[in-house]
Amino acid sequence: MSEIILSVKDMEKTYVGGVHAVRGVSFEVTEGESLAIIGSSGSGKSTVLRCINRLIEPTKGIVKLKGERINTPASDINDVRSRIGMVFQSFELFAHLRVIDNVSLGLIHVRGMGKEEAESKARNVLERVDMLDRVDAYPGNLSGGQKQRVAIARALAMSPEVMLFDEPTSALDPELIGSVLETIQGLAEEGMTMVVVTHEISFARDVADRVIYMDQGLVAEEGPSSIIDKPETERMKEFLSSIND
Amino acid sequence: MASEATIEGARRVPRGVVLFVSVAIFSLIFSISEVSAQEVRSGWEVMESGTEFDLLSAEVHENDIWAFGTGGITIISSDDGVTWSEVLSETSQNLTSSDSNFGAMVVAGNNGTVLLLNDGIWTDLSTDIIGDITDISLTGNNSLVVVSGNTAWTCTINEGGVDWEIVWGDSANSLNSVSFLDSENGLIAGESGLILATNDGGETWDYRDAPGALSEVDIVDIEYFSSIRAYAISEDGHILKSSREGSLAVGFVWSIVEIEREYPAGGSNEWVKGGTEIDYDASSINVLSQSKIMLAGPNGYLSLSKDGGNIVSRQMIPVSNDTSFNAFAMQDGFRGVAVGDGGVILRTENAGSEDFVGFEVADFNDFGQFVDYSKERLMDGLVATAKIVFFGILMGFSLGIILSMLKTSPITLKNVAQTNRYQLLVMVALVPTWAILQVPVLVLRIIRIPIENPLDSTLISYRERSAQISASEPLNIFAIRFIGMTLIVFGVYRILSNLDKISALNLDGWEHIYSPIGAPSAVFWIILGLAIAVLGGIFLSCNGDFSIRDLKVGKAEFSLNPWGIRPLNTIATAYTDIFRNTPLLVQFMFIHFGFELGRRMQEPGLMLFNFEYLQGNANFLTDIFVVYETDPESLAYRRPIGGILEDRAYISAIFALGLNSGAYQCETIRGAVAAIPSGQMEAGRSIGLNYMQSMRLVVMPQAVRICIPPLGNEMVNLVLNSSLAMIIGYAEITRQGKLIVATTFQVFWTWGMVLVSYFLITWTLALFLRYLEERTRIPGLGISGGA
């Protein structure tokens, strides 16, 4: 039995204004596992992800990273975040920094590395996402797929214990999606622990070890990736057929 | 490729223009030509007095000029001071003072000597009950007032004889000078800043307030010139001026004249900043008109000011500089004599002004000659403008950054209420101490001495401790409510204890809108008290639930979010609201004349960086604040001749521009920060940067680029707004323009040249900002048309 890296227990989130986005979600991710969270828009997938690294504070529930509770005021939020990599739907690259500086920023200012050491590590990571040839480019001059791969490299550079992907391909043109998915798949094969919120059902099926289907802030169905082909609940069936159409 | 060529092209044009502008400015500076040879002749002429005695007083009476001196010497001239003859004296006492008025003349001296000349007949009023008389003034053709020692006397001549009456002897301070405007209104000046006034012909005297700075200084001469103006001079060279202010008669309000420039003798253009005292000892002041005054003193000092003391020009004298001048007797605004020790009499027909011989009279209708005359002034103005603009921009930008950070700060009252005692300790005591220690640590690290801040571990452990406490201990609602109660009590107490001061202002109805000016501290405390009481109320209502509260009043629904109030934002908003909703011109006048910021900063500033301290300790940093003249030969020796503290108007102008611009720049920067997508902050936080790091490394660098164009706009505005500094007497370009117009009457040329000067400054600045924008542009970010 491999180690449980991330566990979420009874997570709830009510937004200011009363929207009850997450109504008690629990799951665990073991080392090297990749978990896909699927579900229709507004089902609370992204909220769950953001609650994990506390970009949003969960209203209730416990989040543990390697057995240590991280959603208490006592935990050092900046340290926790540096141990959890996050990739955003809209990339959010630092527009004023070159690719290499985007990746090495955290290494220098969070990990306290020297500039040279940080850059050499950044180059290693950029090589893994196949972006080594554009290290001096500015994000504005990259394609969407390239941007997302740099964003992955930026998260990866911090050597996170778990990576969170928030719909990493939904802002991309169809022909650019492939390269990003390949990169993520490569990471999964290397044994990176990850939670991927995605609309790419085929990707979830091929890459994820487990799939969670969320509906109206609750986990509606959970199981190995094979459940995508044989959904048990009506709602998941509806969801899948609406996507496949 | 085509688009890159356009960028290159766009960059090249401004560079060429910058070069052109620099060449233009430098050629202007170098073209300043030498002034042609000249000769200056003194405006005073030595007259033969026929005596070697010291002449201590002089008087114009009817068509004659009289002079009096030691040993009772009395001489008279009937031809406007050209030839003098001695008159047989009635006394052998020293005659020290005199007065002529109401068709009579009186002269007084040692041991109570008083001689009155009326209708050609001398009357000896001398009395042995008075000692040496220091000054005398007539209040009628048979009544007068004398001062002697620390007493003042009136003397009335009636049929029964001579009545001497003591009218003042209350003060230990001796009285130096007395002057009457008419038979009723008079002034006395004396030791330790003493000024007395009467409005009943000298029967009763009341204290008047001399400026506080003179409370230790003797006022040596006073002259009640007209119903709207009186002047006095102190032994250390302060010129005091009193004007009628509204219904307040002359004598109530005295101010020290700011001496803008002091010129040495000889028609030199090398003036020095005067500060508030003239550079020489003066013992006598003579007022020729409302604003034209002459000064005399020991060491050959004679000077003239045509503008009430703002510009004082020392005069050349045709006798030795050891001569002590004691008095003037002027027949009108131009003709008269000055008398001094050793029987010296100097006569003038132009108020002593120097005659310039060999000067070409400039023809200001000739544009070349006009420019020759005005360029130096404009250049001085250009430099002066550049100085306030530089410091104004520096101050405005720093202030703008700080204010915009306060405005965007996410700290709410909820965060404040959740603060525990360890966090408080960390914030209030530990972090500041740590920061102070960090400075030497960083310096030592720069010179390669690896050293740790000794508080590092303490800080970390306290942070951990406070985090543990906030994790483990529930919110201490009792403590929050107790603090809330205390705040309410304090706030209400503050309001109540200051309300009296507001009612003491005797304001009716809408007049109360001016109460912030009538009782600034009371209004400040009332507003602060209200804020504190409201804050206390919010804290008192704490029940651990910080959510938004919905209220229903009748049909209307309100939602209250008291815990969402951001205190830092509120403070910054109050500041920007005040500065953005009042005109800059009024701010200039309020700051300089009303609040006297310049004076309040200059005095302690010069005390800190005093002449003795800076001798040998001056460096480029202290030079920014003040530079002293260290050449003992110079007229300005020991005077500030450079730096911010040199000139009060300079200080006030920097602050007015900086404080005002800061409010506007704050909004610009805040807008730019708001324009950065929140995802950038999230992305920064997601890799583990803290709030300040994300702000500094991610948000601000992008925001600064966004705000370069609007900030550039603001800075150009600041340059243009700097012209308002003329209103407080700061000699920047616009004021220089006004001075040039006053001399040359060439309105079109002058203001046209001022416009050109402004255009050169602002355009250079605008080009630089355009270049900066081009240089910092991030490829692929934003719509820039071609880039």
Image: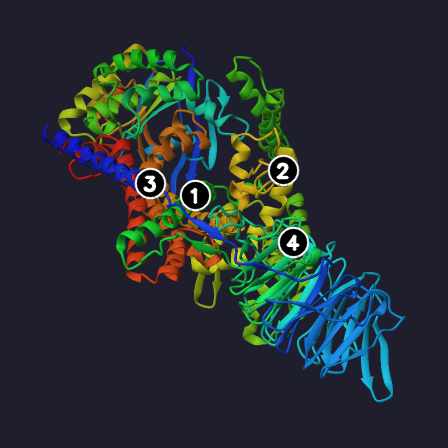
Residue farthest along the left direction in this orientation: B2
- Of circles 2 and 4, the one toward us is 4
Identify the mark nearer the N-term, 2 or 4.
Answer: 4
On the image, the x and y values in percent for residue B442 come to: 54, 21
Identify the mark nearer the N-term, 2 or 1.
Answer: 1
Identify the mark nearer the N-term, 3 or 2.
Answer: 3
- Of circles 3 and 1, the one toward us is 3
- Of circles 2 and 1, the one toward us is 2
Identify the mark nearer the N-term, 1 or 4.
Answer: 4
Question: Which mark, by number, is residue B237?
Answer: 4
Question: Quick check: A6 left or right of B186?
Answer: left
Is label 2 on the same chain as label 4?
yes
Q: Which residue is mark 2?
A: B611
Q: Give neighbour class at mark 1: few <14, some 14-19, many 20+ (Cα, 10 Å).
A: some
Asked if the residues shown at circle 4 and circle 3 are in contact, with their CB atoms under 8 angstroms apart, the answer is no
Residue at image point 31% right, 61% down: B746
Q: Give neighbour class at mark 3: few <14, some 14-19, many 20+ (Cα, 10 Å).
A: few
Q: Amino acid at mark 1?
A: Lys
Q: Amino acid at mark 3?
A: Ile
Residue B129: quadrant of the picture: bottom right
On the image, the x and y values in percent for residue B132 come to: 83, 64
Q: Secondary structure at mark 1?
A: helix
Q: Which residue is mark 1?
A: B387
How far apart are the alpha carbons under marks 2 and 4?
19 Å
Tell which of A146 and B635 is nearer to you.
B635
How far apart are the alpha carbons under marks 2 and 1?
23 Å
Identify the mark nearer the N-term, 3 or 1.
Answer: 3
Is label 1 on the same chain as label 4?
yes
Question: Which mark, by number, is residue B29?
Answer: 3
User: Does residue B338 sit above or below B782 in this rendering?
Assistant: below
Q: Amino acid at mark 4?
A: Gly
